[in-house]
Amino acid sequence: MRNMITMGEFIVKKQADYPTATGELTSLLSSIRLAAKVVNREINKAGLADIIGSMGAENVQGEVQQKLDVYANERFKAALEARGEVCGMASEEEEDFVSFDSELSRHSKYVVLIDPLDGSSNIDVNVSVGTIFSIYRRVSTPGAGVTLEDFLQPGNRQVAAGYVVYGSSTMLVYTTGFGVNGFTYDPSIGCFCLSHENIRIPEEGKIYSINEGNYIKFPDGVKKYLKYCQERDEATHRPYTSRYIGSLVSDFHRNLLKGGIYIYPSGTNSPNGKLRLLYECNPMAFLVEQAGGKASDGFGRIMDIQPTALHQRTPYFVGSTKMVDRAEAFMREFSAHEDPANQG
């Protein structure tokens, strides 16, 4: 049996590779890892406990909150505040950012943006869900309270990002800007162990992931790209396979390993796209670029967008580089004669 490397050991080893590292980011990632274990435990017993179903309230997004949305949000908030390595966090489940006001926290370097439980409406039917997180270095002065500007940073300033997928096995995948590595949770020892080292997304894929139920409202460029995916052409191995789970983490994870593209465009019931730039799009963009892929809003790089609001939404095209390039080409070609009446 090969020697297992735990995530804790891996992080410490990587820190040792960079003599200027001071350990705060290592401790911060450990906090996220701990909270993920707790959330994983609750998800795995969801059908046996009174934690599935709706809270009977909506979050700031206007979406019905699930009980586990609230639970996961509180667990990650508590874990991030406990060690004092974070001066504040912003969450998809919170209307405003949260400031951590202990003396230690106010002097810390980092802020965290998080989607505590992506795809939570799928829990009731036992479909994979996930957590997405993003870490930035604060721009405000340490010692003072955290500010909105600390969170409204473009994705190209991320220092780390990752996700946890709670599925048939639980995996934590993250990057600190030096490649992407994945760790699978071993419940027998209570540790995440290195299982996917230096993940690279195939340059070309055979999977497209999109909610085709919204087809009639899609921009013309997306419609034309979908027809391209469905055409028969042996030279390019088309038609491609359609796979859509409805949990971004799950769809992204599959495409990261196998090659593919995930699309959530404008022109649906959410005119600006459904996905949040800060909590979902930027962290996944950082990961996919570190793995050799690409993330776009259909016309340009996601991580170059300057955010203007905590809960800002954006169209999203993410995955294998050649597939995203081709989708962008269709968007450029057909955007000039887009029918305004077609935009929902």
Image (cartoon, rainbow, N blue to C red):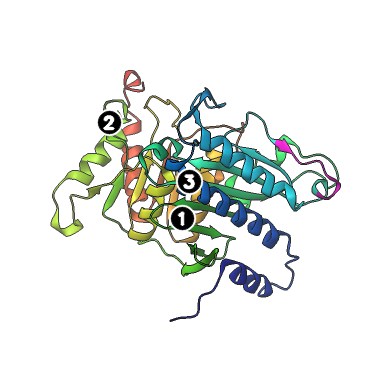
**Circles 3, 1 touching at the beta carbon (< 8 Å):** no
Amino acid residing under circle 3: Ile
Of callouts 3 and 2, the N-terminal one: 3
Q: Helix, strand or loop at disc 3? A: helix
Q: Residue at x 42, y 58 (%)?
A: 169
* SS at mark 2 in the image: helix
The x and y percentages for residue 287 are: 50, 55
Q: CA distance from mark 1 to mark 2?
A: 26 Å
- In the drawing, what numbered circle is on residue 43? 3
Label 1 vs 2, first from the N-terminus:
2
Q: Nearer the viewer, mark 1 or mark 2?
A: 2
Neighbor class of circle 1 (other Cα within 10 Å; few <14, some 14-19, many 20+) is many
Q: Magenta span covers which residues?
A: 98-104
Image quadrant holding the N terminus, namely bottom left
Location of residue 269 with respect to 236 vertically, above or below: above
Magenta span contains residue 239 = no
Query: Residue at coordinates 52% horizontally, 46% vertically from top-left?
Result: 42
* Residue hosting label 2: 213
- Circle 1 residue: 288
Task: Give x and y (percent) for residue 152.
Answer: 65, 38
